[in-house]
């Protein structure tokens, strides 16, 4: 199986915390769609191996993909179906903002093939929405969630952000309770991260904003996990929660090193080499202007920026870093068979100590591996790095 990621770089405005690539001007939207269609043709012509595997997931990310019209989304999906072998059970996700969620638009994109919507609510608090510089209001968030419920879309998810400055647990519970009113099949909940090149990063450097303390963020994570769990929405990755059968297949494929191809400016790709000895990761031109220009110059695959070959050891260590953030953890058998990676005595000793202290769950019968407890998931990156450093 393989996945496609399509980066749509347009946004109405810049959120204070966002570090993804986006453009607030949409004057080049039509030309961009034309160029993106051209990239699809170029990629499949130059690298037939990119079409050898069945496409199981397609993800429109950004930016704000809902800035495209339903007609443009349909054009892109028709081209994908023409050039790739797309599974009958394909998961096709489109990211949206609440202010773009209209019943007519939803009906059109669902008819085009979108069967999963990812909506960035972030918060229902009006003051916090203004602080984040979100384009929607609390009222629009409620209307959008109601529309999603009635859309007939197979699945959908909503984002929440916790660990905000001056946000207490009662404020967080108000956001969670408001979202649970709509019985979401999936929730992504992230702690507010201060990225240096964002407006929020500048505000923190100037002491205009003081980030939440780590202890408060940890308490917020616990509140989110317990509240969603009581509602039947279980955590399957540090920041992702789902009812059974509604886990994101696309994101899960990243965590298991499934081949994926990124299209559009700044999109990343990872593809295993034919000999199975490793994989190559690369990224597209990171700016819209350069992406459009390089396409006109007929440059190969509209890329390549810092292509990186990852041998099996590097992939195994990355698998450990990503896999330990999931509820399934990492199986020793998988590490050995796919990556030729075996835990040594020092690693096993440290894992045994962490298991005794309650950070790592007991082994299942006949299934050796590492799965973190809820307590351990709060320290997932630290634990993974400690295991890797002993390798």
Image (cartoon, rainbow, N blue to C red):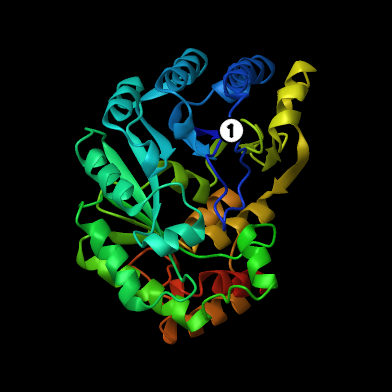
Q: Residues within 10 Å of mark 1 (few under 14, many from 20)?
A: many
Counting the numbered discs, the total is 1
Q: Locate residue 242, reporting x and y percent.
A: 30, 54
Q: Quadrant of residue 74?
A: top left
Depth check: 280 or 73 in front? 73
Q: Judge from the rendering whether residue 48 lies leftward or rightward of residue 221; answer left or right.
A: right
Q: Judge from the rendering whether residue 98 lies leftward or rightward of residue 75; answer left or right.
A: left
Asked if 78 appears above or below 259 in the picture, the reply is above
Depth check: 299 or 236 in front? 299
Q: Locate residue 27, reporting x and y percent.
A: 61, 25
Depth check: 326 or 187 in front? 187
Q: Locate residue 158, reporting x and y percent.
A: 35, 50
Could one spot residue 239 in this view of the protein?
Answer: no
Q: Residue at x 43, y 86 (%)?
A: 356
Q: SS class of the residue under badge 1?
A: strand
Question: The C terminus lies in which quarter of the figure?
Answer: bottom right
Q: Judge from the rendering whether residue 73 lies leftward or rightward of residue 244; answer left or right.
A: right
Asked if 211 appears above or below 101 in the picture, the reply is below
Could one spot residue 313 in this view of the protein?
Answer: yes
Q: Residue at x 60, y 38 (%)?
A: 24
**Which residue matches tag 1?**
261
Q: Judge from the rendering whether residue 193 lies leftward or rightward of residue 146; answer left or right.
A: right
Asked if 183 appears above or below 291 in the picture, the reply is below
Q: Locate residue 266, reporting x and y percent.
A: 66, 38
Depth check: 60 or 200 in front? 200
Q: Quadrant of residue 190?
A: bottom left
Asked if 54 appears above or below 378 in the picture, the reply is above
Q: Residue at x 36, y 75 (%)?
A: 222
């Amino acid at each position: 199986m393989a996945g496609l990621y399509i980066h749509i770089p347009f946004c109405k405005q810049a959120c204070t915390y966002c570090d993804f690539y986006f453009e607030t001007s949409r004057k080049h939207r039509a030309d961009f769609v034309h160029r993106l269609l051209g990239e699809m043709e170029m990629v499949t012509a130059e690298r037939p191996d990119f079409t050898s595997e069945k496409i199981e997931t397609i993800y429109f990310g950004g930016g704000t993909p809902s800035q495209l019209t339903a007609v443009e989304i349909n054009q892109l999906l028709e081209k994908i179906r023409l050039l790739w072998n797309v599974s009958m059970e394909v998961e096709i996700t489109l990211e949206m903002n609440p202010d773009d969620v209209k019943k007519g638009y939803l009906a059109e994109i669902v008819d085009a093939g979108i069967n999963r919507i990812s909506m960035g609510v972030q918060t229902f608090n009006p003051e916090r929405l203004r602080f984040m510089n979100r384009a929607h209001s609390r009222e629009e968030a409620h209307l959008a969630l109601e529309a999603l419920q009635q859309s007939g879309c197979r699945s959908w998810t909503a984002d929440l952000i916790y660990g905000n400055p001056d946000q207490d647990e009662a404020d967080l519970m108000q956001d969670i309770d408001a979202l649970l009113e709509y019985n979401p099949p999936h929730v992504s909940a992230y702690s507010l991260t201060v990225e240096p090149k964002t407006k929020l990063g500048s505000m923190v450097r100037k002491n205009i904003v003081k980030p939440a303390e780590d202890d408060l963020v940890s308490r917020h994570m616990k509140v989110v996990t317990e509240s969603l769990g009581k509602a039947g929405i279980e955590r399957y990755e540090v920041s992702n929660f789902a009812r059974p059968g509604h886990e994101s297949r696309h994101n899960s494929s990243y965590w298991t090193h499934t081949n994926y191809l990124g299209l559009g400016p700044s999109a990343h790709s990872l593809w295993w080499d034919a000999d199975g000895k490793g994989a190559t990761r690369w990224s597209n031109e990171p700016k819209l202007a350069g992406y459009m220009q390089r396409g006109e110059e007929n440059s190969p695959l509209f890329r390549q920026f810092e292509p990186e070959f990852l041998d099996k050891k590097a992939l195994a260590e990355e698998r450990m870093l990503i896999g330990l953030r999931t509820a399934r953890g990492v199986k020793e058998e998988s590490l050995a068979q796919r990556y030729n990676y075996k835990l040594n005595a020092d690693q096993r000793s440290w894992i045994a100590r962490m298991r005794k202290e309650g950070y790592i769950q007991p082994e299942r019968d006949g299934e050796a591996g590492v799965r973190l407890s809820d307590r351990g998931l709060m320290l997932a990156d630290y634990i993974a790095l400690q295991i890797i450093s002993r390798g």
